[in-house]
Image: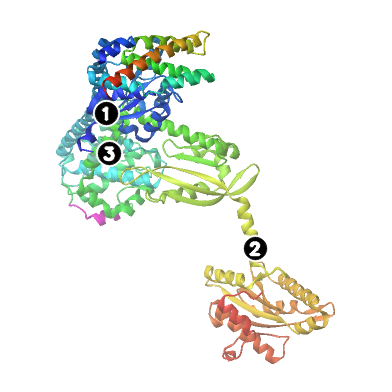
Amino acid sequence: MEETNTKKQTILVVDDSEMNRSILADMLGDEYNILEAEDGLEAVSVMQKKSDEIDLMLLDIVMPRMNGFDVLGVMNQNGWIEATPVIMVSAESGSPQVERAYDMGVTDFIMRPFDALIVRRRVVNTLLLYAKQRRLVSMVEEQIYEKERRSGMMIDILSHIVEFRNGESGLHILHVRTLTDFFLRLLMQKTDQYHMTAADISRISTGSALHDIGKIAIDEHILNKPGRLTAEEFEIMKTHAMVGARMLEDLPVHQDDPLVQTAYEICRWHHERYDGRGYPDGLAGDDIPISAQVVALADVYDALTSPRVYKAPIPHETAVQMILDGKCGAFNPLLLECLSENAGEIRGQLAAGSVSKGTRREIQAIADESLHSGASKRTLRLLDYERDKYSFFAALTEDIQFEYTVSPPMITLSPWGAKKLGVDEIVMDPVNNPRLQQVLGPGVWDRLSALLHATTPKEPDAHMECLLHYGGEARWHRVISRAVWSSDTPPRFEGALGKAIDVHEARVRLQEMEQKASTDAMTGLLNRASARERIEERIAERPDSNYALAIFDVDRFKSANDTRGHQFGDQVLIQVAQRLRRSIRGTDISCRAGGDEFMLFLEYKTEIEKTIDRIFHSLCGPFEGFNVSVSMGVALGETVGLDYENLFHAADLALYSVKQAGKGLYRFYDRSMKGTLSAITAIDTEARQGGDAS
Amino acid sequence: MTLQECYQAMGADYEDVLSRLRSERLVQKFVLKFLDDGSFDLLCRSMAEGQDEEAFRASHTIKGMCQNLGFTKLGQSSHELTEALRGGRSPEADQLLERVRADYEQTAGTIRAFRQSIGA
């Protein structure tokens, strides 16, 4: 195809008669790309694939499978009709039909029989009309942008006058604005509690330029006094906050404008302190609007780092440290976190004058937003359609699905999920909803929130397992969630989507299996592999504590087995395990190391000898005519070092030395045993390989 | 046979079609194309099988083509049949079908003769 082809407009001709399609195509000639569909269904499928490329549709009414009105219905539902004009082609001249078609968004009619001139004229007119509309939309966009730019300029001029009179550098206003914008974005990343949109941030940054307008009423001699102000002068200086607020309040017009209201907050309260010791109202904490809190911080930072008639500039690092140390006022701890974590970036932000760029981007976004109601109805309809689709499928699945938005703070649950949890489908202000928090239990919301905030736009997914409480029980769920980040820089956390899957049975089964896998079936004690794991965990958890590891075996066990049978032998082992369990604490770790060998791991404070002696004696004693006695070797962490292998090896050597001395004893490892043989070489070897001796 | 004579023989309006399509070449192209259209066969078949809706659409299509091509006579009878089939088959539909059949055969026969005469 030639290059010009791509620039041609594309017309989709929908008619079940091949001849009619062909006549229309011939009439329209080579000026257009013609696509054909032989009934409504085909037309819809073409539109689904490339609705963006179709500039016009010629649509017949009477067709098999799907008629013209049904096609119009689908075009309306999907919002295609907003961007693709439809000319109805018909021999039906009955007026109710015509009226119905116009009601469904048809732009024009072409009656059969076709007249080439009329067909061409109508097609051209319709295409022109739509092109004009698109141009209008972009003109409106430009006008809004221009309007925003002008009002921004007026604010700049006004605040510059104040600045000029204050004898400030001329950059103060710009700096405060840049930093306000910067801190607000950081704050939004950190927390949802202030419910702010991009438009809010833009408004506060713009309003920040007016923070000192009240100074216009302050005597120039006080404003520009090089030395310290007297108490009286300072009192006069302090009035600038309230004066500025009054000036805005007394504006004859625009009082209800959100920008004016934001500027009012900033003027009045940008000298308040988080601890309540500021002026003029002595507000404390979050009673001070966040706009004023942020501007206050930006103001202080820039005042410190800029030269003034009464002082030289203070270096960046010193200024940040002074603020963090509370030497220049009291601020919201979250804001101080933003400052300390990102201090390195501040100078770059100021140098780049990122505000102007940021503002431009903001304005574009605002223009888009305000046009949504008119020009982008189509987008909204598409969204509506997607939403319908989503809620349809959500209604079908037996999942707990949720959608969370920061602003407004709201959780929407799938109908099934809401019913299951006994919560409303829409939960406003979820953090403070008692029913929802009851379902979640303590800490779950914060955990999930922290996980989601820690994601990035590139890797927005987070999962965790938690208990959900409903229907009178607590069940384990796996929560899979995706954070929604805005496209701003830096991105703002806007909410999340996700679902909670009931994994209770699986998790309980897993726990049971873990339990089974870690214990010795006959005695119910741990097996050696899992004992070793726990011992190592314990040592890692509390490496400063004292530990003893003991290994013992049952004396003459082989002869008991041989003379009284294996079943009796098993009974003896079970008996020994029982005695062991009874004589130790729940926190001690005991295990059957294999055969008739057992292992014990104890944490102690003092007098380990007494403890070992007591345990040793409680293990011994007659059982069904068999006199149970054991031989035991003990190793102490303080002697051999806190390491499982060392402890095991030393205890083993001590046991060997007991056997040499004639059984029925216990002995602590000492260095004299070093280099002797192992009592249970086989176990030792396996232990080193991490094998399981059971 | 000229195209105009062909139109006369079919009971069709040559002036009308030429004024709309504005090119004898186009008129001839579509007249010849009329023979390839399957709507008439579909009409007869669906009438015989009692597929009334299908019959309505086929009849409607024939009527539309006739309007576009200025086939006044067949256009009229297919128009009447279309109305007799709109919203269900009315009693006179079968009779009207016979009229459409007669007109179609006359029209198609004439076009075939025309096609032969121009050696297409």
**Picture disc at residue A248:** 1
| In this rendering, position of residue A603 left or right of residue A402 | right
**A537 up-or-down from B85: above or below:** below
Q: CA distance from mark 1 to mark 2?
A: 71 Å
- Residue A385 placed where, x, y %? 43, 31
**A268 up-or-down from A454: above or below:** above
- Residue A632 placed where, x, y %? 68, 82
Residue range in magenta is A312-321
Q: Nearer the viewer, mark 1 or mark 3?
A: 3
What amino acid type should be assigned to the residue bearing mark 2?
Gln
- Residue A255 placed where, x, y %? 29, 25
**Picture disc at residue A205:** 3
Q: Report the residue marked by disc 2.
A: A515
Residue A669 visible in the picture: yes
**Chain letter, disc 1 residue:** A
Q: Are marks 1 and 2 on the same chain?
A: yes
Which residue occupies the foreground of this view, A484 or B118? B118
